[in-house]
Image (cartoon, rainbow, N blue to C red):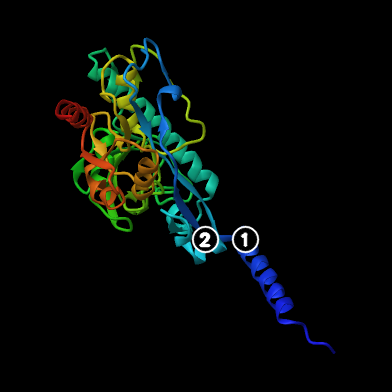
Amino acid sequence: MKRPSWPTVLLALGAALLLLVGVLYVAPSDDYILLPDHARALKPLVVVRGERPDRDGGGVYYVAVDVRQASLLEQLFPGLQDGATLVPEHVLNPQGVDEKVRRQAELRAMRRSQRYASAVALKALGLPVRIEPVGAGVAKTVPGYPAAGKLRARDLIIAVDGEAVTLPDDLTRILSKHRPGETVALRLRRRGRERELMIRTVPNPENPRRPFLGIELQEPKITLPLPVKFDLGQVGGPSAGLAFALDLLEELGRDVDHGQRVAATGEIGLDGSVREVGGVKQKTIGARRSDMDVFLVPGENAAEARRYANGLRVVPVDSFQQALQALATKAETS
């Protein structure tokens, strides 16, 4: 029998290798991959009555993270794509939580961030914003997360680890003192009676470094003096809150960007505080690739952002007012 020539053997091996790579590229793994996305201008996506045209060529941008299930090839070689981070499935989807449930929670967080940002921005303009707090009342629990089966709709959380809770933001602030996996003591009022529960936290699907219980709280009733509409499609999560508030001020005539292309990330509270978010590596790379002039990030995220800035100016902020001041100060010294 005639032996195949070396060129034939090499071609066969090459074809087999290409086939293997193709299979690994298509076949899904058990992990998820986080990838940078480009910065997106908010002006075309936000509609508010009384908005004014942009006259200086700047703009406020938000930066999202592309999250999807990793292929086997990406699981084996995550470094093939610049800025990629591999995340185990149990971090984003704890046991018993499917992709659909997680996405629904992210979309609810996005809608909440839009309401909070609108309230903060319009209050900063001196407009009458009415906020009727409802305490830290439980609206529902998310199936598969620790609170499911322990807390009920209409429960009122009044303390965490002995510290009083009077607003939804209080619960977030106190929980942030813990690490995922730690147990917290909740005191709640149910049907007029107080009781205590111990609940073990899990990683927050939006930011795995933060603890999460899987509670959807009753939102304060927010009455705005004028309508604000957002159209971000299926983008989820609370991390664009700071960018939303900055853009609203800009669109209503306040010179926020001072002619700069400003990217911003950070969860915003009703008190104007700016909280830590996840995916900062990917967001920084996305802002840099999009030729932003400045990237505003929560103070807790600043060190990580600077590791990937490569010349992009990173400004840490812990509140909405601090963000406005930082942008104004840069404009005065430029």
* Residue at image coords 29%, 18%: 122
Front residue of 45/107: it is 45
Label 2 secondary element: helix
Q: Residue furthest bottom?
A: 1
* Residue position for label 2: 74
Spot occupied by residue 116 in the image (x, y as percentages of width and height): 33, 27
On screen, residue 326 above or below 205: above
Front residue of 141/286: it is 286
Q: Residue furthest right?
A: 1
Q: CA distance from mark 1 to mark 2?
A: 10 Å
Front residue of 63/203: it is 63
Check disc 2 and give the amino acid type. Glu
Quadrant containing the C terminus is: top left
Q: Which mark is residue 75?
A: none
Check disc 1 and give the amino acid type. Ala
Q: Is residue 147 at all visible to an observer of this figure?
A: yes
Front residue of 246/89: it is 246
The picture quadrant where one finds residue 272 is: top left
Q: Which mark is residue 27?
A: 1
Label 1 secondary element: loop
Q: Residues within 10 Å of mark 1 (few under 14, many from 20)?
A: few
Spot occupied by residue 59 in the image (x, y as percentages of width and height): 34, 26
Quadrant containing the N terminus is: bottom right
On screen, residue 307 above or below 253: below
Spot occupied by residue 297 in the image (x, y as percentages of width and height): 27, 40
